[in-house]
Image (cartoon, grey):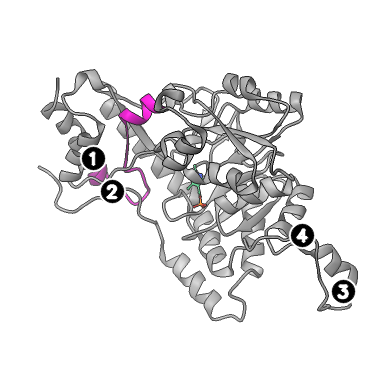
Amino acid sequence: MARREFLSFSPPCIGDEEIAEVVDTLRTDWITTGPKAKQFERDFTAYLGSQGALALNSCTAGLHTSLITLGIGPGDEVITTALTFAATVNVIEHTGATPVLVDVEPDILTIDPAQVAAAITPRTRAIIPVHFGGHPADMDPINAAARAHGLAVIEDAAHALPARYKGEYIGAGANPTSFSFYATKNLTTAEGGMLTGEPDFLDRARVVGLHGMSRDAWKRNAKGGSWYYEVVMPGYKYNMTDMQAALGLRQLQRLDGFQARRTEIHARYDAAFAGCDAIQTPTIRPWAEPSRHLYVLRLHPETLRIGRDQFIEELGARNIGTSVHFIPIHIHPYYRDKYGYAAEAFPITYSNYLREVSIPLNPRMTDEDVNDVIEAVLEVVEAYRA
Ligand SMILES: *Cc1c(COP(=O)(O)O)cnc(C)c1O
């Protein structure tokens, strides 16, 4: 029997602790970037064992700030994946550089290192891998190609908190790495992001992300709190408020609990769908400990009388919310028309897009919710078997 209430795909998981911390912030005289943003940066750094952290108002801001800090602009090329959210590629366009899309690995749907290497030209300045669904991209060959050609690697870690690659947390290394705290992500501040990387890089990124105001000038000229500052470039307004940081601080304390629940649900889905010939379950490489941000199941089209779109409608009719990650970049009109891409230009991205469905996976789900999702998926499969 179908469930009575609609199951949201990814509702936020906000508790009394977060609410109290936000209210506390509102009762102080410091509501924008201040002590709580600093504290959140310190706690985030400690959690990942990163070299530092810069709190910003989105992951998009972190990616854009990274490109600007590296001096990337017109005439430059930046290699990234065709299977990502628009923000990853939009920020490259914002700098005036040219995005160069490449296809993904068929099992884990992250950027294909061999195709990255093949796409490098004398104009290439950076590579932006995306840790799709929270499964790390295969970073060793990507970093090796970058080192060999003197390129930067900026990691889109919007999904990857907390995820490990060969035992090390994503965000713990030297690459600029941008996390998202958007409402649907594993940790949320409603809107927000965190950039990790080397301390020198983050110092420069902090200037880029706050109007181009130099703190060094501030320090140089400070006489017990000077009014003086210097604008050293036309920077952006990307800082995180203390109200957002208040949410983040408390969410971070609950992250391991969230993660344990995500892992449980992921395992229950794996077990429930393992014997179903119509469904391909997610692959986890031996070196990966994914954040399990998404559960992307892929349909085997030859086993069903209906396509992915109707599969989603059938789940909706059974009150199960779903999503699709992602509509490939190269079929969006702006990118398709500007660069003249055919849909089949990235065949692995495109063919997987046509058969993927993301089902609910979040710590708010009860065992009953999980059962309802499993039941609905298997019921639709049986109802429309070819
Ligand atoms: C959500 C998301 C972003 C953007 O994050 P914001 O914090 O909303 O800017 C970037 N890349 C990917 C892959 C995402 O899923």
> Which numbered circle lies on residue 366?
2
Instruction: Give the mark toward the camera: 4 or 3.
Output: 4
> Which numbered circle lies on residue 222?
3
The amino acid type found where label 2 is placed reads Thr
SS at mark 4 in the image = loop
Q: Are marks 4 and 2 in contact (CB under 8 Å)?
A: no
User: Which of 289 and 386 lies nearest the eye of the viewer?
Assistant: 386
Q: Is residue 217 left or right of residue 158?
A: right
- Relative image position of residue 346 (x, y in whole percent): 46, 25
Q: Quadrant of residue 355?
A: top left
Q: Is residue 14 left or right of residue 103?
A: left
The amino acid type found where label 3 is placed reads Ala
SS at mark 3 in the image = loop
Identify residue for label 4.
233
Q: Residue at x 70, y 60 (%)?
A: 235
Magenta segment: does it hold 356? yes
